[in-house]
Amino acid sequence: MWLSRFVSTSILRGDPMTPSPADVRTEGASRPAAPPRRLGRADALVLAGVTAAAVLCAAFRYLPMIDLPQHFAMVSIIAHHGDPAYGFADRFTFDFWGRPYATVYLLGAGLTRILGLAAAMRAVVALCTVAPIIGLWALLAALGRPRVHALLALPLAFGCVWH
């Protein structure tokens, strides 16, 4: 209630910090559509960096990741859990609650049905590698900062994911 009194008295006084009644949108009024944002040179550089990082995930026969074989095994167990030829259902149960890799494993198992295990894991590794760069790019865009600074995350993308 005090806010409505403040706003109404400041409008009546002609306070320059408050909008005039003509400037205040009425409820239900539609905002004009914003023009589509074009991708600039900075966005093209970030896209090139993201593409290069994703290609690096497919360029090498053996990725330098210490625990990648364990992740392959876990995704294989999830993907073939119901197959009696593997016998995983007799030996393994799942508990994904609070597991940091649950989304990665489920995504990998889903892609394994389409791409096969090796290609699915490379796709998941590529996605996990470029996700921080894309996330930083989106954050910089939302904050109105230069989006080219997302390239600074490129060397860091191969850090903790690739331990």
Image (spheres, rainbow, N blue to C red):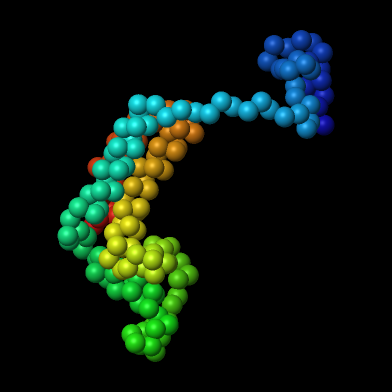
Point out the image quarter for the N terminus: top right
Q: Residue at x 42, y 29 (%)?
A: 39
Left or right relative to 36: residue 130 = left
Point out the image quarter for the C terminus: bottom left
- Front residue of 108/137: it is 108
In the rendered image, residue 50, in percent from the top left (x then y), is placed at 31, 42
Q: Quadrant of residue 6?
A: top right
Q: Residue at x 79, y 26 (%)?
A: 26
In the rendered image, residue 122, in percent from the top left (x then y), is placed at 29, 59
Q: Is residue 78 above or below residue 102?
A: below
Q: Residue at x 39, y 26 (%)?
A: 40
Left or right relative to 72: residue 136 = right
Q: Is residue 114 above or below residue 82?
A: above
Q: Quadrant of residue 79?
A: bottom left
In the rendered image, residue 92, in percent from the top left (x then y), is placed at 38, 83
Asked whether residue 149 appears in the rendered view, the answer is: no
In the rendered image, residue 59, in percent from the top left (x then y), is placed at 20, 52
Q: Number of marks in the image?
A: 0
- Front residue of 81/147: it is 81
Q: Quadrant of residue 103?
A: bottom left
